[in-house]
Image: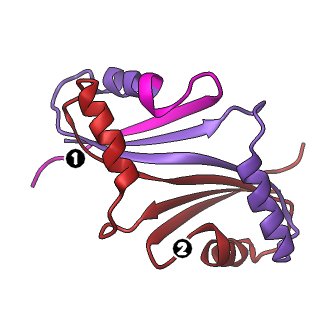
Chain colours: A purple, B red
Amino acid sequence: MFKVKVYVTLKESVLDPQGAAVKNSLHSMSYKDVTNVRIGKYLELTLDQNTADVEQTVKEMCDRLLANPVIEDYRYEIEEVVAQ
Amino acid sequence: MFKVKVYVTLKESVLDPQGAAVKNSLHSMSYKDVTNVRIGKYLELTLDQNTADVEQTVKEMCDRLLANPVIEDYRYEIEEVVAQ
């Protein structure tokens, strides 16, 4: 079994209105020290697979569904979980 | 300056319909090995602050705005960035 953590973030050059809204809210709650907020997605996938091409599969899934490669970057961590 | 990464995830006991939808989509794209998908948020905050209570501030921000403690868990990583 594999546990995969995928982090999807907007590219640096893409505006993040959601992040800007959170930043404004934090400022209005008097956390004035926050200078920037960027919001992305965090996905945890469980793969029931014992093949060697997990990385390739995850990459494909990210490119085809989980991230929009036009405006988003992604990175992932794959961890093998040994069943008890 | 501090870079803070916040990971907000739904608690294990809370249903994740968005994750279920993504799992179904992956299955229909023939990634049948995916047994579970959970979706959370990933936030990157920049704090322009040189005090010692960054951790306390981040914890407060999470509890008050960034996460909903009733249904969500969060964890964070704080990294100090030295200005060039």
Residues shaded magenta: A63-84
Label 1: few (<14), some (14–19) or many (≥20) C-alpha neighbours in 10 Å: few
User: In the rendered structure, which amino acid carries the disc numbered 2?
Assistant: Asn
Pick the front one: A22 or B55: A22
Say if residue B57 shows up in the picture: yes
Taking B6 as reference, is A52 left or right? left
Residue B61 x/y as whole percent: 69, 73
Give above or below for A40 relative to A29.
above
Image quarter hosting the N terminus of chain A: top left
Quickly name the residue at label 1. A81
Left or right: B80 in relation to B42: right
Residue at image mark 2: B68
Q: Is residue A30 above or below residue B44?
A: below
Q: Amino acid at mark 1?
A: Val
Chain to which the residue tagged by mark 2 belongs: B
- The percent position of residue A58, horizontal first and vertical second, equals 36, 28
Q: Is residue A33 magenta?
A: no
Identify the subunit bearing mark 1. A
Give the left or right position of residue A75, taking residue B38 as reference: right
Q: Position of residue A56 (x, y in %)?
A: 34, 20
Q: Position of residue A8 (x, y in %)?
A: 55, 39
Q: Nearer the viewer, residue B30 or A78?
A: B30
| Among the 4 quarters of the image, the one containing residue A12 | top right
Q: Secondary structure at mark 1?
A: loop
- For the point 65% across and 49% down, the residue is A39
The total number of labels drawn is 2
Q: Which residue is at 75% across, 77% downward?
A: B53
Q: Pointer 2: residues within 10 angstroms few (<14), some, or many (20+)?
A: some
Is residue A74 in the magenta section?
yes
Q: Residue at x 31, y 48 (%)?
A: B20
Q: Are marks 2 and 1 on the same chain?
A: no
Q: Please, what secondary structure does the residue beneath circle 2 have?
A: loop
